[in-house]
Image: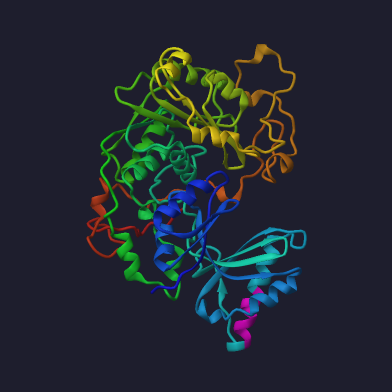
Amino acid sequence: MEQKYELIAKTFMGLEPVLAKELAQLGASDVEIGRRMVSFTGDKEMMYRANFQLHTAIRILKPIHHFKARSADDVYEEIKKIDWTEYLGTDKTFTVDSVVFSEEFRHSKFVSYKVKDAIVDQFREKTGKRPNISISNPDIRLNMHIADDKCTLSLDSSGESLHRRGYRQESVEAPLNEVLAAGMILLSGWQCDTDFIDPMCGSGTLLIEAALIAKNMAPGLFRKEFAFEKWPDFDADLFDEIYNDESLEREFNHKIYGYDIDMKAVNTARMNVKAAGLSDIITIEQQDFKNFTQPANKSIIISNPPYGERISTPDLLGTYKMIGERLKHQFKGNDAWILSYREECFDQIGLKPSIKIPLYNGSLECEFRKYQMFDGKLKDFRSEGGVVKTEEEKRQMAEKHRFKKEREFKKRLEEKEENEEADILNFTFHRHDLSKNRGGHESFDRSGKERRERKEFNKDRKDFGGKDRKDRKDFKRGGKREFGKKDFGGKKRRFDDDED
Protein backbone atom coordinates (compact mmCIF):
# COMPACT_ATOMS: atom_id res chain seq x y z
CA MET A 1 0.00 0.00 0.00
CA GLU A 2 1.33 3.42 -0.99
CA GLN A 3 2.58 5.53 1.92
CA LYS A 4 0.40 8.50 2.90
CA TYR A 5 1.87 11.80 4.03
CA GLU A 6 0.95 15.36 4.87
CA LEU A 7 0.23 17.74 1.98
CA ILE A 8 -0.70 21.41 1.74
CA ALA A 9 -2.69 23.08 -1.02
CA LYS A 10 -2.19 26.85 -1.23
CA THR A 11 -4.93 29.13 -2.51
CA PHE A 12 -6.22 32.73 -2.38
CA MET A 13 -8.02 34.34 0.54
CA GLY A 14 -11.70 33.46 0.39
CA LEU A 15 -11.33 30.30 -1.70
CA GLU A 16 -10.33 27.97 1.14
CA PRO A 17 -13.81 26.34 1.56
CA VAL A 18 -14.10 25.72 -2.18
CA LEU A 19 -10.65 24.14 -2.30
CA ALA A 20 -11.47 21.97 0.72
CA LYS A 21 -14.60 20.71 -1.05
CA GLU A 22 -12.59 19.94 -4.18
CA LEU A 23 -10.07 17.96 -2.14
CA ALA A 24 -12.81 15.98 -0.38
CA GLN A 25 -14.36 15.11 -3.75
CA LEU A 26 -10.93 14.03 -4.96
CA GLY A 27 -10.72 11.57 -2.07
CA ALA A 28 -8.22 13.37 0.17
CA SER A 29 -8.18 12.53 3.89
CA ASP A 30 -7.89 14.75 6.97
CA VAL A 31 -8.92 17.89 5.07
CA GLU A 32 -8.50 21.00 7.25
CA ILE A 33 -8.97 24.64 6.26
CA GLY A 34 -6.29 27.18 7.19
CA ARG A 35 -5.43 30.71 6.13
CA ARG A 36 -4.94 30.74 2.35
CA MET A 37 -4.32 27.00 2.49
CA VAL A 38 -5.93 23.63 3.06
CA SER A 39 -3.99 20.75 4.62
CA PHE A 40 -4.76 17.12 3.80
CA THR A 41 -3.17 13.69 3.64
CA GLY A 42 -2.69 11.47 0.65
CA ASP A 43 -0.30 9.22 -1.23
CA LYS A 44 1.75 9.90 -4.35
CA GLU A 45 -1.27 9.46 -6.61
CA MET A 46 -3.26 11.98 -4.57
CA MET A 47 -0.41 14.50 -4.85
CA TYR A 48 -0.28 14.03 -8.63
CA ARG A 49 -4.06 14.34 -8.92
CA ALA A 50 -4.15 17.44 -6.70
CA ASN A 51 -1.72 19.21 -9.04
CA PHE A 52 -3.47 17.99 -12.17
CA GLN A 53 -7.16 18.21 -11.26
CA LEU A 54 -7.75 20.94 -8.66
CA HIS A 55 -9.25 24.14 -10.07
CA THR A 56 -8.64 26.41 -7.06
CA ALA A 57 -5.13 25.47 -5.86
CA ILE A 58 -2.10 27.69 -6.53
CA ARG A 59 0.46 25.05 -5.58
CA ILE A 60 0.79 21.76 -3.70
CA LEU A 61 3.46 21.46 -1.02
CA LYS A 62 4.81 18.31 0.63
CA PRO A 63 6.20 19.15 4.11
CA ILE A 64 9.35 17.23 5.00
CA HIS A 65 10.41 18.89 8.26
CA HIS A 66 8.61 20.78 11.05
CA PHE A 67 10.66 22.49 13.74
CA LYS A 68 10.93 25.55 15.96
CA ALA A 69 13.63 28.18 15.55
CA ARG A 70 14.37 31.51 17.17
CA SER A 71 17.43 32.46 15.16
CA ALA A 72 19.00 32.01 11.75
CA ASP A 73 21.54 29.64 13.33
CA ASP A 74 18.67 27.46 14.59
CA VAL A 75 17.29 27.25 11.05
CA TYR A 76 20.71 26.35 9.67
CA GLU A 77 21.23 23.54 12.19
CA GLU A 78 17.75 22.07 11.68
CA ILE A 79 18.09 22.02 7.90
CA LYS A 80 21.46 20.26 8.19
CA LYS A 81 19.78 17.43 10.13
CA ILE A 82 17.92 16.35 6.99
CA ASP A 83 19.60 13.73 4.80
CA TRP A 84 19.59 15.72 1.57
CA THR A 85 20.84 12.82 -0.53
CA GLU A 86 17.22 11.57 -0.46
CA TYR A 87 16.13 14.60 -2.48
CA LEU A 88 19.18 16.00 -4.23
CA GLY A 89 22.44 15.05 -5.90
CA THR A 90 25.47 17.15 -6.70
CA ASP A 91 24.44 16.99 -10.36
CA LYS A 92 21.03 18.57 -9.58
CA THR A 93 19.93 22.16 -9.08
CA PHE A 94 17.58 23.62 -6.48
CA THR A 95 16.00 26.86 -5.31
CA VAL A 96 14.44 28.01 -2.02
CA ASP A 97 11.39 30.25 -1.62
CA SER A 98 10.60 31.57 1.86
CA VAL A 99 7.49 33.10 3.40
CA VAL A 100 8.06 34.72 6.78
CA PHE A 101 5.65 36.08 9.42
CA SER A 102 7.90 36.59 12.43
CA GLU A 103 9.54 39.23 14.58
CA GLU A 104 12.72 37.16 14.67
CA PHE A 105 12.93 36.63 10.91
CA ARG A 106 12.11 39.78 8.99
CA HIS A 107 13.74 39.05 5.64
CA SER A 108 12.55 36.06 3.64
CA LYS A 109 15.60 36.11 1.35
CA PHE A 110 17.93 35.84 4.33
CA VAL A 111 16.03 32.75 5.48
CA SER A 112 16.36 31.30 1.97
CA TYR A 113 20.12 31.90 2.07
CA LYS A 114 20.46 30.09 5.41
CA VAL A 115 18.52 27.08 4.09
CA LYS A 116 20.65 27.06 0.95
CA ASP A 117 23.88 27.31 2.96
CA ALA A 118 22.91 24.39 5.19
CA ILE A 119 22.17 22.15 2.19
CA VAL A 120 25.32 23.13 0.31
CA ASP A 121 27.54 22.75 3.37
CA GLN A 122 26.19 19.26 4.06
CA PHE A 123 27.06 18.12 0.54
CA ARG A 124 30.53 19.69 0.70
CA GLU A 125 31.28 17.98 4.01
CA LYS A 126 30.12 14.58 2.72
CA THR A 127 31.25 14.62 -0.92
CA GLY A 128 33.47 17.63 -1.49
CA LYS A 129 30.99 18.80 -4.13
CA ARG A 130 27.80 20.84 -4.03
CA PRO A 131 24.53 21.15 -6.00
CA ASN A 132 23.99 24.43 -7.82
CA ILE A 133 21.22 26.99 -7.54
CA SER A 134 18.81 27.59 -10.43
CA ILE A 135 16.12 30.22 -10.12
CA SER A 136 14.36 29.71 -13.45
CA ASN A 137 14.33 25.94 -13.92
CA PRO A 138 15.53 24.01 -10.86
CA ASP A 139 15.31 20.26 -10.40
CA ILE A 140 14.02 20.67 -6.85
CA ARG A 141 11.96 23.56 -5.45
CA LEU A 142 11.87 24.06 -1.69
CA ASN A 143 9.43 26.18 0.27
CA MET A 144 10.26 27.51 3.76
CA HIS A 145 7.38 28.87 5.85
CA ILE A 146 7.98 30.59 9.20
CA ALA A 147 5.17 31.83 11.48
CA ASP A 148 6.62 33.23 14.70
CA ASP A 149 9.00 30.41 15.72
CA LYS A 150 7.16 27.60 13.90
CA CYS A 151 8.99 26.50 10.76
CA THR A 152 7.92 24.16 7.97
CA LEU A 153 10.18 23.12 5.12
CA SER A 154 8.35 21.63 2.14
CA LEU A 155 9.03 20.27 -1.30
CA ASP A 156 7.11 22.28 -3.90
CA SER A 157 5.49 19.66 -6.14
CA SER A 158 3.93 22.19 -8.54
CA GLY A 159 6.72 24.45 -9.73
CA GLU A 160 5.19 27.31 -11.65
CA SER A 161 1.94 28.51 -10.08
CA LEU A 162 -0.98 26.26 -10.99
CA HIS A 163 -2.98 29.25 -12.21
CA ARG A 164 -0.77 29.16 -15.30
CA ARG A 165 -2.89 26.55 -17.02
CA GLY A 166 -1.11 26.72 -20.37
CA TYR A 167 -4.05 27.55 -22.65
CA ARG A 168 -3.55 31.32 -22.65
CA GLN A 169 -2.12 32.36 -26.02
CA GLU A 170 -2.67 36.11 -25.71
CA SER A 171 -3.88 38.37 -22.96
CA VAL A 172 -5.64 41.67 -22.39
CA GLU A 173 -4.79 44.32 -19.83
CA ALA A 174 -5.19 43.07 -16.23
CA PRO A 175 -6.49 39.56 -17.01
CA LEU A 176 -8.42 37.72 -14.32
CA ASN A 177 -6.35 35.07 -12.55
CA GLU A 178 -7.45 31.58 -13.62
CA VAL A 179 -7.64 30.20 -10.07
CA LEU A 180 -9.74 33.16 -8.94
CA ALA A 181 -12.02 32.73 -11.96
CA ALA A 182 -12.56 29.04 -11.19
CA GLY A 183 -13.17 29.89 -7.54
CA MET A 184 -15.83 32.45 -8.46
CA ILE A 185 -17.65 29.88 -10.59
CA LEU A 186 -17.55 27.23 -7.86
CA LEU A 187 -18.61 29.75 -5.20
CA SER A 188 -21.66 30.64 -7.29
CA GLY A 189 -22.97 27.10 -6.94
CA TRP A 190 -23.51 26.76 -10.68
CA GLN A 191 -24.48 23.15 -11.36
CA CYS A 192 -23.66 23.28 -15.10
CA ASP A 193 -27.39 22.87 -15.77
CA THR A 194 -27.89 26.25 -17.50
CA ASP A 195 -26.18 28.40 -20.08
CA PHE A 196 -23.26 30.50 -18.81
CA ILE A 197 -22.72 34.14 -19.84
CA ASP A 198 -19.92 36.66 -19.30
CA PRO A 199 -21.01 39.92 -20.98
CA MET A 200 -17.63 41.60 -20.38
CA CYS A 201 -15.38 38.61 -21.03
CA GLY A 202 -11.97 40.17 -21.79
CA SER A 203 -9.55 37.40 -22.75
CA GLY A 204 -12.11 34.71 -21.92
CA THR A 205 -10.76 33.38 -18.61
CA LEU A 206 -14.16 32.94 -16.93
CA LEU A 207 -15.54 31.28 -20.08
CA ILE A 208 -12.73 28.73 -20.32
CA GLU A 209 -12.72 27.95 -16.62
CA ALA A 210 -16.50 27.47 -16.75
CA ALA A 211 -16.09 25.06 -19.68
CA LEU A 212 -13.41 23.06 -17.86
CA ILE A 213 -15.70 22.77 -14.83
CA ALA A 214 -18.75 21.96 -16.98
CA LYS A 215 -16.95 19.14 -18.80
CA ASN A 216 -15.01 18.09 -15.67
CA MET A 217 -11.73 18.46 -17.53
CA ALA A 218 -8.52 18.66 -15.53
CA PRO A 219 -7.07 22.21 -15.62
CA GLY A 220 -3.55 20.75 -15.66
CA LEU A 221 -4.16 19.19 -19.06
CA PHE A 222 -2.42 22.00 -20.93
CA ARG A 223 0.60 22.52 -18.66
CA LYS A 224 4.10 21.79 -19.87
CA GLU A 225 5.33 20.25 -16.63
CA PHE A 226 5.01 19.91 -12.88
CA ALA A 227 7.92 20.10 -10.44
CA PHE A 228 7.33 16.57 -9.12
CA GLU A 229 8.30 15.18 -12.55
CA LYS A 230 11.93 15.96 -11.67
CA TRP A 231 11.86 14.23 -8.29
CA PRO A 232 13.99 11.09 -7.86
CA ASP A 233 10.92 8.99 -7.02
CA PHE A 234 8.75 10.26 -9.90
CA ASP A 235 6.44 7.51 -11.17
CA ALA A 236 6.00 8.28 -14.89
CA ASP A 237 3.63 5.36 -15.49
CA LEU A 238 1.33 6.44 -12.66
CA PHE A 239 1.19 10.02 -13.88
CA ASP A 240 0.58 8.94 -17.49
CA GLU A 241 -2.32 6.83 -16.24
CA ILE A 242 -3.78 9.85 -14.43
CA TYR A 243 -3.12 12.15 -17.36
CA ASN A 244 -4.83 9.90 -19.92
CA ASP A 245 -7.82 8.97 -17.74
CA GLU A 246 -10.97 10.49 -19.24
CA SER A 247 -13.46 8.41 -17.27
CA LEU A 248 -14.63 11.35 -15.17
CA GLU A 249 -15.16 13.76 -18.06
CA ARG A 250 -18.76 14.47 -19.03
CA GLU A 251 -20.93 15.99 -21.72
CA PHE A 252 -22.16 19.57 -21.34
CA ASN A 253 -25.53 20.07 -23.01
CA HIS A 254 -25.73 23.84 -22.69
CA LYS A 255 -23.74 26.74 -24.12
CA ILE A 256 -21.25 29.27 -22.81
CA TYR A 257 -21.44 32.80 -24.25
CA GLY A 258 -18.92 35.62 -24.01
CA TYR A 259 -19.29 39.21 -25.18
CA ASP A 260 -17.00 42.22 -25.15
CA ILE A 261 -17.19 45.70 -26.66
CA ASP A 262 -13.51 45.53 -27.68
CA MET A 263 -12.87 43.53 -30.86
CA LYS A 264 -9.25 42.94 -29.83
CA ALA A 265 -10.46 41.27 -26.63
CA VAL A 266 -12.94 39.18 -28.64
CA ASN A 267 -10.18 37.94 -30.95
CA THR A 268 -7.91 37.22 -27.98
CA ALA A 269 -10.64 35.26 -26.20
CA ARG A 270 -11.40 33.27 -29.35
CA MET A 271 -7.72 32.39 -29.71
CA ASN A 272 -7.52 31.18 -26.11
CA VAL A 273 -10.73 29.18 -26.43
CA LYS A 274 -9.45 27.52 -29.59
CA ALA A 275 -6.15 26.66 -27.89
CA ALA A 276 -8.09 24.98 -25.09
CA GLY A 277 -10.11 22.97 -27.62
CA LEU A 278 -13.41 24.33 -26.32
CA SER A 279 -14.84 26.10 -29.36
CA ASP A 280 -17.67 23.57 -29.53
CA ILE A 281 -19.35 24.92 -26.38
CA ILE A 282 -18.04 28.52 -26.16
CA THR A 283 -19.29 31.27 -28.45
CA ILE A 284 -17.77 34.77 -28.32
CA GLU A 285 -19.16 37.84 -30.06
CA GLN A 286 -18.50 41.58 -30.08
CA GLN A 287 -21.30 43.33 -28.20
CA ASP A 288 -21.68 46.23 -25.80
CA PHE A 289 -23.32 45.18 -22.53
CA LYS A 290 -25.84 48.00 -23.00
CA ASN A 291 -27.24 46.03 -25.95
CA PHE A 292 -27.62 42.81 -23.94
CA THR A 293 -31.07 41.23 -24.25
CA GLN A 294 -32.97 38.52 -22.38
CA PRO A 295 -31.40 35.13 -23.20
CA ALA A 296 -33.67 32.48 -24.67
CA ASN A 297 -32.62 29.82 -22.16
CA LYS A 298 -32.12 29.70 -18.40
CA SER A 299 -28.71 31.26 -17.72
CA ILE A 300 -26.26 32.51 -15.15
CA ILE A 301 -24.08 35.61 -15.52
CA ILE A 302 -20.69 35.75 -13.81
CA SER A 303 -18.59 38.78 -14.67
CA ASN A 304 -15.65 40.91 -13.57
CA PRO A 305 -16.28 44.44 -14.89
CA PRO A 306 -13.56 47.12 -14.74
CA TYR A 307 -13.34 48.94 -11.41
CA GLY A 308 -10.94 51.74 -12.18
CA GLU A 309 -7.74 50.31 -10.72
CA ARG A 310 -5.69 48.52 -13.37
CA ILE A 311 -8.32 49.11 -16.07
CA SER A 312 -9.92 52.51 -16.59
CA THR A 313 -13.04 53.23 -18.58
CA PRO A 314 -14.89 56.44 -19.42
CA ASP A 315 -17.86 57.04 -17.10
CA LEU A 316 -17.16 54.11 -14.77
CA LEU A 317 -20.15 54.82 -12.52
CA GLY A 318 -22.38 55.09 -15.57
CA THR A 319 -21.16 51.66 -16.67
CA TYR A 320 -22.33 50.09 -13.40
CA LYS A 321 -25.65 51.90 -13.61
CA MET A 322 -26.08 50.39 -17.08
CA ILE A 323 -25.19 46.93 -15.72
CA GLY A 324 -27.96 47.21 -13.13
CA GLU A 325 -30.47 48.38 -15.73
CA ARG A 326 -29.65 45.50 -18.10
CA LEU A 327 -29.89 42.92 -15.34
CA LYS A 328 -33.19 44.29 -14.07
CA HIS A 329 -34.91 44.48 -17.44
CA GLN A 330 -33.15 41.84 -19.56
CA PHE A 331 -32.16 39.05 -17.19
CA LYS A 332 -35.40 38.18 -15.41
CA GLY A 333 -35.66 34.77 -13.83
CA ASN A 334 -31.89 34.28 -13.62
CA ASP A 335 -28.96 34.86 -11.25
CA ALA A 336 -26.06 37.24 -11.84
CA TRP A 337 -22.77 37.40 -9.94
CA ILE A 338 -20.54 40.49 -10.11
CA LEU A 339 -17.00 40.90 -8.77
CA SER A 340 -16.01 44.50 -8.07
CA TYR A 341 -14.07 46.70 -5.70
CA ARG A 342 -15.80 49.98 -4.93
CA GLU A 343 -18.97 50.56 -2.92
CA GLU A 344 -19.72 53.43 -5.30
CA CYS A 345 -19.81 50.98 -8.20
CA PHE A 346 -22.09 48.51 -6.43
CA ASP A 347 -24.37 51.40 -5.40
CA GLN A 348 -24.83 52.32 -9.05
CA ILE A 349 -26.08 48.81 -9.89
CA GLY A 350 -29.08 49.73 -7.78
CA LEU A 351 -30.06 46.14 -6.92
CA LYS A 352 -30.05 44.37 -3.58
CA PRO A 353 -27.62 41.45 -3.46
CA SER A 354 -28.63 38.22 -1.74
CA ILE A 355 -25.06 37.47 -0.67
CA LYS A 356 -21.68 39.23 -0.52
CA ILE A 357 -18.47 37.22 -0.52
CA PRO A 358 -15.09 38.89 0.22
CA LEU A 359 -12.41 37.93 -2.30
CA TYR A 360 -8.99 39.27 -3.19
CA ASN A 361 -8.23 40.18 -6.79
CA GLY A 362 -4.51 40.76 -6.63
CA SER A 363 -4.02 43.12 -3.71
CA LEU A 364 -7.56 44.48 -3.90
CA GLU A 365 -10.07 43.25 -1.33
CA CYS A 366 -13.15 42.95 -3.51
CA GLU A 367 -16.68 41.67 -3.10
CA PHE A 368 -18.42 38.98 -5.13
CA ARG A 369 -22.14 39.75 -5.04
CA LYS A 370 -25.10 37.68 -6.16
CA TYR A 371 -28.18 39.32 -7.68
CA GLN A 372 -31.29 37.19 -8.04
CA MET A 373 -33.42 38.66 -10.79
CA PHE A 374 -37.19 38.14 -10.76
CA ASP A 375 -40.16 39.66 -12.55
CA GLY A 376 -42.47 41.89 -10.56
CA LYS A 377 -42.42 42.80 -6.87
CA LEU A 378 -40.45 41.01 -4.18
CA LYS A 379 -43.61 40.38 -2.14
CA ASP A 380 -45.26 38.63 -5.08
CA PHE A 381 -42.09 36.65 -5.82
CA ARG A 382 -41.97 35.35 -2.25
CA SER A 383 -45.70 34.60 -2.14
CA GLU A 384 -45.21 32.36 -5.17
CA GLY A 385 -42.55 30.35 -3.34
CA GLY A 386 -39.51 32.25 -4.60
CA VAL A 387 -36.42 32.22 -2.40
CA VAL A 388 -34.18 35.28 -2.47
CA LYS A 389 -31.67 34.03 0.07
CA THR A 390 -31.12 30.35 0.87
CA GLU A 391 -30.55 29.12 4.43
CA GLU A 392 -26.88 28.54 3.59
CA GLU A 393 -26.55 32.09 2.26
CA LYS A 394 -28.20 33.43 5.42
CA ARG A 395 -25.75 31.42 7.53
CA GLN A 396 -22.77 32.72 5.58
CA MET A 397 -23.88 36.34 5.81
CA ALA A 398 -24.40 35.95 9.58
CA GLU A 399 -20.83 34.80 10.15
CA LYS A 400 -18.86 37.11 12.41
CA HIS A 401 -15.66 38.66 11.09
CA ARG A 402 -16.73 37.85 7.53
CA PHE A 403 -15.27 41.19 6.53
CA LYS A 404 -12.34 42.86 8.25
CA LYS A 405 -13.39 44.96 11.23
CA GLU A 406 -11.69 48.11 9.94
CA ARG A 407 -12.39 47.37 6.29
CA GLU A 408 -13.80 50.13 4.15
CA PHE A 409 -14.00 50.82 0.46
CA LYS A 410 -12.09 53.86 -0.73
CA LYS A 411 -14.21 56.96 -0.25
CA ARG A 412 -14.28 60.09 -2.31
CA LEU A 413 -13.33 63.27 -0.50
CA GLU A 414 -15.54 66.35 -0.72
CA GLU A 415 -16.13 66.04 -4.43
CA LYS A 416 -18.77 68.09 -6.24
CA GLU A 417 -21.51 66.34 -8.16
CA GLU A 418 -20.70 68.18 -11.37
CA ASN A 419 -17.91 65.66 -11.84
CA GLU A 420 -20.07 62.57 -11.28
CA GLU A 421 -19.86 61.52 -14.92
CA ALA A 422 -16.05 61.32 -14.85
CA ASP A 423 -14.02 58.17 -14.42
CA ILE A 424 -13.66 57.32 -10.76
CA LEU A 425 -9.88 57.38 -11.19
CA ASN A 426 -10.10 61.17 -11.54
CA PHE A 427 -11.46 61.56 -8.03
CA THR A 428 -9.25 62.11 -5.03
CA PHE A 429 -9.15 59.35 -2.44
CA HIS A 430 -8.01 59.14 1.16
CA ARG A 431 -4.56 57.68 1.55
CA HIS A 432 -5.14 54.59 3.69
CA ASP A 433 -2.65 52.65 5.72
CA LEU A 434 -3.46 49.43 3.94
CA SER A 435 -1.10 47.47 6.15
CA LYS A 436 -3.93 47.81 8.68
CA ASN A 437 -6.99 47.83 6.46
CA ARG A 438 -5.91 45.27 3.88
CA GLY A 439 -4.23 42.70 6.04
CA GLY A 440 -0.70 43.80 5.21
CA HIS A 441 -1.11 43.88 1.46
CA GLU A 442 -0.13 46.56 -1.02
CA SER A 443 -0.29 50.35 -0.57
CA PHE A 444 -1.82 52.83 -3.01
CA ASP A 445 -1.06 56.38 -4.08
CA ARG A 446 -3.68 59.15 -4.10
CA SER A 447 -5.01 58.18 -7.53
CA GLY A 448 -5.73 54.67 -6.32
CA LYS A 449 -3.23 52.95 -8.62
CA GLU A 450 -1.20 50.09 -7.28
CA ARG A 451 2.44 50.65 -6.37
CA ARG A 452 3.17 47.01 -6.51
CA GLU A 453 1.44 43.64 -7.01
CA ARG A 454 1.55 40.65 -4.74
CA LYS A 455 3.97 38.03 -6.02
CA GLU A 456 1.17 35.47 -6.40
CA PHE A 457 -0.31 37.60 -9.17
CA ASN A 458 2.54 37.95 -11.64
CA LYS A 459 1.51 39.54 -14.90
CA ASP A 460 0.47 36.83 -17.31
CA ARG A 461 3.08 35.91 -19.86
CA LYS A 462 2.37 34.52 -23.26
CA ASP A 463 2.23 30.77 -23.30
CA PHE A 464 2.22 29.05 -26.63
CA GLY A 465 1.58 25.68 -25.06
CA GLY A 466 -1.71 25.16 -26.84
CA LYS A 467 -0.88 26.12 -30.45
CA ASP A 468 -4.00 26.26 -32.64
CA ARG A 469 -5.67 23.02 -31.70
CA LYS A 470 -9.09 22.55 -33.20
CA ASP A 471 -10.17 20.52 -30.21
CA ARG A 472 -8.72 18.53 -27.40
CA LYS A 473 -8.92 15.30 -29.32
CA ASP A 474 -6.45 16.68 -31.86
CA PHE A 475 -3.55 16.39 -29.49
CA LYS A 476 -4.33 13.00 -28.04
CA ARG A 477 -1.93 10.18 -28.83
CA GLY A 478 -3.83 7.49 -27.04
CA GLY A 479 -0.99 6.61 -24.75
CA LYS A 480 1.96 8.30 -23.22
CA ARG A 481 2.73 11.95 -23.57
CA GLU A 482 5.36 13.16 -25.95
CA PHE A 483 7.31 16.38 -26.17
CA GLY A 484 8.17 18.61 -29.07
CA LYS A 485 6.25 17.11 -31.99
CA LYS A 486 4.36 19.29 -34.41
CA ASP A 487 1.85 16.54 -34.97
CA PHE A 488 -0.96 16.87 -32.44
CA GLY A 489 -2.09 13.30 -32.90
CA GLY A 490 -1.43 12.50 -29.26
CA LYS A 491 -2.66 13.64 -25.92
CA LYS A 492 0.23 16.03 -25.60
CA ARG A 493 1.11 18.84 -23.28
CA ARG A 494 4.79 19.43 -24.07
CA PHE A 495 5.80 21.94 -26.71
CA ASP A 496 8.98 23.36 -28.22
CA ASP A 497 8.18 27.03 -27.68
CA ASP A 498 9.54 28.44 -24.46
CA GLU A 499 7.54 30.97 -22.50
CA ASP A 500 8.37 34.66 -22.86
- What is the tally of numbered marks visible in this picture? 0
Q: What secondary structure characterizes most of the magenta part?
A: helix
Where residue 285 sits: x, y (%)? 34, 28
Q: In terms of depth relative to the viewer, which is nearer, 42 or 388?
A: 388
Q: Residue at x 33, y 62 (%)?
A: 242
What quarter of the picture does the N terminus occupy?
bottom left
Q: Is residue 89 visible?
A: no
Name the image quarter holding residue 193. Answer: top left
Q: In terms of depth relative to the viewer, which is nearer, 268 or 340?
A: 340
Where residue 57 sits: x, y (%)? 48, 52
Name the image quarter holding residue 130. Answer: bottom right
Where residue 257 sits: x, y (%)? 34, 31
Q: Is residue 342 left or right of residue 411?
A: left
Q: Provide the residue span drawn in magenta.
A: 117-125
Q: Residue at x 53, y 81 (%)?
A: 85
Q: Is residue 91 above or below residue 480?
A: below
Q: Is residue 330 above or below residue 263?
A: above
Q: Is residue 104 visible?
A: yes
Where residue 396 sits: x, y (%)? 55, 37
Q: Is residue 12 left or right of residue 102?
A: left
Q: Is residue 318 left or right of residue 106?
A: left
Q: Residue 173 magenta-drawn? A: no
Q: In terms of depth relative to the viewer, which is nearer, 70 or 420?
A: 70
